[in-house]
Amino acid sequence: RHELYELVPFTAVFGLQRKERNLSMAFASYAADLDTMEADQIAVANTQKHLSSEEKEMHRSQANLLMLDELEQDSVMVTTPLIFAIIVAVMNQFLVGYSTGVMNAPESVVFPGHSTATWALAVSAFAIGGPFGANIAGGMAETRGRRGALLLDT
């Protein structure tokens, strides 16, 4: 699993945005330190004097801010195809949920000889219980793992 997190961009995996932000900050800090050392070497080559600690700190903070701004600009990529793909995926989920929740097709097989009220009760219980089951299943998958949650649910 750890290899998967290393290969997948952090913004694609839910819950890892903080880790991605921390890595960006560490990378920006490291790059700013390298840039400050290079600026100090250039100053020594030109003036035979090292930069003062104030000049180094000011150079480091400016380089750090520039690097963080550049990293944040790269990470914010909302494009028209992405928005269109999200809209299509959401609309498809509504269609799947509706088709699953209505359950009109198997009525004669599932409830032969039952009243309309019994059928309506079964359909409404399915539609009302679905969100509760989804919330509980997510917590179970977190605590027991996906396999353990499936074994308990079946």
Image (cartoon, rainbow, N blue to C red):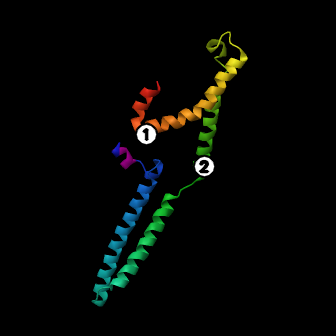
Residue tagged by mark 2?
Answer: 83
Q: Quadrant of residue 71?
A: bottom left
Element type at mark 2: helix
The label shown at residue 142 is 1
Q: Is residue 102 visible?
A: no
Depth-wise, is mark 2 or mark 1 nearer the camera? Answer: 1
Q: Residue at x 43, y 59 (%)?
A: 21
Q: Residue furthest top?
A: 113
Q: Amino acid at mark 1?
A: Glu
The span picked out in magenta is 3-7
Element type at mark 1: helix
Q: Which SS type dominates the magenta stretch? A: helix
* Mark 2 crowd level (few <14, some 14–19, many ≥20, 10 Å Cα): few
Q: Quadrant of residue 118?
A: top right
Q: Say above or below: 147 vs 18.
A: above
Tell me the CA gap for discs 2 and 1. Answer: 29 Å
Left or right of 30 in this view: 138 = right
The label shown at residue 62 is none
Q: Nearer the viewer, residue 86 or 18?
A: 18
Image spot of residue 103 (x, y percent): 64, 23
Q: Say above or below: 27 vs 37.
A: above
Q: Is residue 67 visible?
A: yes
Left or right of 70 in this view: 126 = right
Q: Is 37 in the magenta?
A: no
